[in-house]
Image: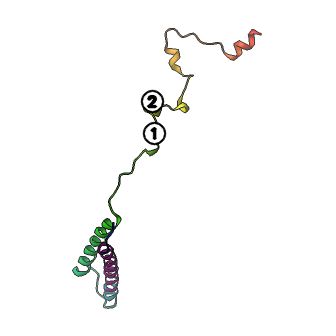
């Protein structure tokens, strides 16, 4: 899986990234002590940070190994196609669609049933 060289590249990359961050902080404090205005970081610090960032990313990708696909619906793999769209909680039997039917005969209401007795 992960070779020792890749792990070493990750470690060296992290140390180099930490060193570039420390150098940037030290440069800022040097500018404050000498009462100079901060414009940009020196080019060597920027290059070190970018190179070490790419080294860490490359090393981590090689240490992690091959990427695998994550199934989005793993629990639905064993369900038949006919039952996937079956959602009983959405069943509705009392809706206005039956009033639009030409052969609709309204059923007796509860008050009508009470009056029969």
Asked if residue 46 is positioned above or below residue 85 in the image, the reply reads: below
Image coordinates for residue 18, horizontal then vertical, percent: 35, 79
Q: Are marks 1 and 2 in contact (CB under 8 Å)?
A: no
* 1 or 2: mark nearer the eye: 1
Instruction: Answer with left or right where residue 90 lies relative to residue 43.
Output: right
Task: Choose between 25 and 56: the one closer to the eye.
Answer: 56
Asked if residue 74 is positioned above or below residue 2 in the image, the reply reads: above
Q: Quick one: SS at disc 2? A: helix
Q: Is residue 82 magenta?
A: no
> Dot 1 surroundings within 10 Å: few (below 14), some, or many (20 or more)?
few
Instruction: Answer with left or right where residue 40 lies relative to residue 81.
Output: left
How far separated are the C-alphas under marks 1 and 2?
12 Å
Q: Quick one: SS at disc 1? A: loop
Q: The N terminus appears in which quarter of the rendering? A: bottom left
Classify residue 80 by image quadrant: top left
Image coordinates for residue 8, horizontal then vertical, percent: 32, 77
Q: Main secondary structure of the magenta part?
A: helix
- Stretch of the chain drawn in magenta: 5-26
Classify residue 105 by image quadrant: top right
Q: Is residue 11 magenta?
A: yes
Q: Which mark is residue 109?
A: none
Q: Is residue 40 visible?
A: no
Classify residue 64 by image quadrant: bottom left
Instruction: Answer with left or right where residue 67 lies relative to residue 95.
Output: left
Image coordinates for residue 102, horizontal then vertical, percent: 49, 9
Q: The C terminus appears in which quarter of the rendering? A: top right
Q: Residue furthest right?
A: 117
Task: Choose between 64 and 13: the one closer to the eye.
Answer: 64
Residue of label 1: 78
| Colour setting | rainbow
> Dot 2 surroundings within 10 Å: few (below 14), some, or many (20 or more)?
few
Residue of label 2: 82
């Amino acid at each position: 899986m992960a070779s020792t060289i890749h792990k070493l590249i990750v470690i060296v990359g992290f140390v180099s990234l930490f060193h570039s961050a420390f150098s940037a902080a030290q440069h800022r404090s040097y500018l404050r002590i000498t009462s100079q205005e901060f414009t940009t970081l020196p080019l060597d610090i920027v290059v070190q940070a970018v190179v070490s960032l790419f080294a860490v990313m490359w090393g981590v990708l090689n240490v992690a190994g091959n990427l695998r696909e994550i199934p989005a619906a793993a629990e639905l793999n064993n369900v038949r196609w006919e039952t996937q769209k079956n959602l009983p909680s959405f069943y509705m039997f009392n809706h206005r669609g039956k009033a639009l039917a030409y052969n609709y005969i309204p059923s007796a209401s509860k008050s009508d049933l009470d009056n029969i007795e």
